[in-house]
Image (cartoon, grey):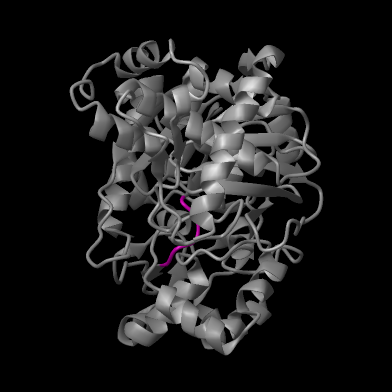
Amino acid sequence: MSRYLLGIDAGSSITKAAIFDDRGRQLGAGMHRIRLQRPNPGWSEIDPDSAWDAMVFAIRAAMQDAGVTGRDIAAVGLSAAMVGAWLSDEAGNALRPGIVWEDSRAQEMLEARAAEIPDFYHRIFLSDGCVLQQGCTLPLLMWLKAHEPDVLGRAAHVLCYKDFLRLRLTGRVAADRTEAAVAPGSALLRDRSQEMLDLFGVSDLAGKLPAVAESESIGGTITPEAAEATGLLAGTPVAIGAGDVPCTVTGASALETGAAMAVLGTTCMIGVVHDRPVFTPPDLGLLFTMPGERWYRAMVNVAGTLNLDWAVETLLPDLASKPDLYQRIEAMIAPLPIGSEGVTYLPYLSESGIIAPVVDVEARAGFHGLTPRHGRPHMVRAVYEGVVLALRDLYRELDGGSREILLTGGGARSPMWTQMVADALGATVLVPEGTEFGARGAALLAATAIGRFGSIREASVSTRAIQRRHEPDAALAPQWDQAFAAYRRHRDKILAR
């Protein structure tokens, strides 16, 4: 009997694949980078053939790393960067580059729509619980209808990223609830919303949006053509899958009511899992409709570890190529006190601004308090602290979570950074075992789809394994309070402009 599960997690810059056993233990992984195309200001696209090639490479690399073959894989699960728009014809051929969530080309049309409909954004929030992102599917449909009607007219399907990849694997078209609900759609219905289709003026295109299914159901099987390309066995079942955030929450064993989970990755977020949709605080943050009849209410700082990547490239180019880069950085900043001797960094490095704790598309990153006595160590430590204090800023907006926070993402690999989070937030931080939690969540969806778990919630919670535990140091609380007060002071100044 085939024993193992394959999870795929396709991001906007890297596609990852990993092999897991029934207990969710990671046995091997592979990855391949993708070049994000920006042909015009505000555009973010991925070449569909490159997306397919990256997934094929990652799958083969993961199987090689785990020492397994396609015959050992019982089922496949998929996750990818959410929403966006991938257009294909009836035969599954891509008609244009895939548009991903970071894209902002629809912004002018959204502003015009909001001028016509004064409660435009609030109506969206009341339906899906999210501050609207320009790269969601319906805004992009609105833009394509106005600017690329010929291409849109030839399209049989408008898909999300993972659904395009599943189409290439199985030849079958489908969508899942986690992405339909934030298209924008309806968090209450866990589905698309006719009201939202009407609001964006795209009701006539509803037939191009695939039928919605449960994430933990079977969405097809590997075709002979896909089997030849990937090394998987033809006929292997493929689960419908879910978006990257729902899969990460599931894979981090957080799919239970009251669980608090943070992602310290390229995007930085923190949220709480609920057994009902939560729309408070209003017009702020995101609400992810989850598999297993759960919802994840999250506050997001759009840029997370991206801030550290920028700091390394800009402030420490001489260290950037060192294999022990992060050990060197942390040894450099460890002697400095909390507060970086007066230097504060606001980690608003995204071109799209911030969506929590306030919505401000013009918010930008910056250092405050610099004097001639400060050097690179102060600035780099301030970047570490700025991301942590942004998490604290977001955590204050959430209700109903435990005082234990599961923490994943690339930043979770740093014990110094994760201890900073525990100390600054005054909460116990739990770092789960493993690295590829999006792929793990996709694999658990696949395991549930073929009957190895009674429910996806059981699959998520019963496979929890903790690698590290960080308890907050109460003695440091006054220093973190002081650093946070400085952070808030500088934050309020730039957001009040």
Asked whether residue 237 is in view, the answer is no
Span colored in magenta: 81-85
From the top left corner, tell me how far across and down residue 169 is, in percent.
41, 52
From the top left corner, tell me how far across and down residue 260 is, in percent.
71, 35
Whether residue 254 appears in magenta in the rendering, the answer is: no
Asked whether residue 491 is in view, the answer is yes
Task: Name the residue located 78 percent from the left edge and 44 percent from the top edge.
Answer: 399
From the top left corner, tell me how far across and down residue 406 is, in percent.
65, 28
Q: Is residue 327 left or right of residue 245?
A: left
User: Residue lying furthest front in this view?
Assistant: 372
Q: Is residue 127 left or right of residue 371?
A: right
Q: Is residue 437 above or below residue 242?
A: above
Q: Main secondary structure of the magenta part?
A: loop
Task: Name the residue located 53 percent from the left edge and 27 percent from the top edge.
Answer: 20
Task: Name the residue located 38 percent from the left edge and 70 percent from the top edge.
Answer: 87
**298 or 329: nearer the viewer:** 329
From the top left corner, tell me how far across and down residue 115 is, in percent.
54, 85
Total tally of numbered discs in the picture: 0
Task: Name the residue located 48 percent from the left edge and 53 percent from the top edge.
Answer: 494
Instruction: Give the quadrant of residue 277.
Output: bottom right
Q: Is residue 44 left or right of residue 73?
A: left
Q: Is residue 334 above or below residue 126?
A: above
**232 or 140: nearer the viewer:** 140
User: Residue lying furthest left in this view?
Assistant: 318
Whether residue 82 appears in magenta in the rendering, the answer is: yes
Q: Quadrant of the N terminus?
A: top right
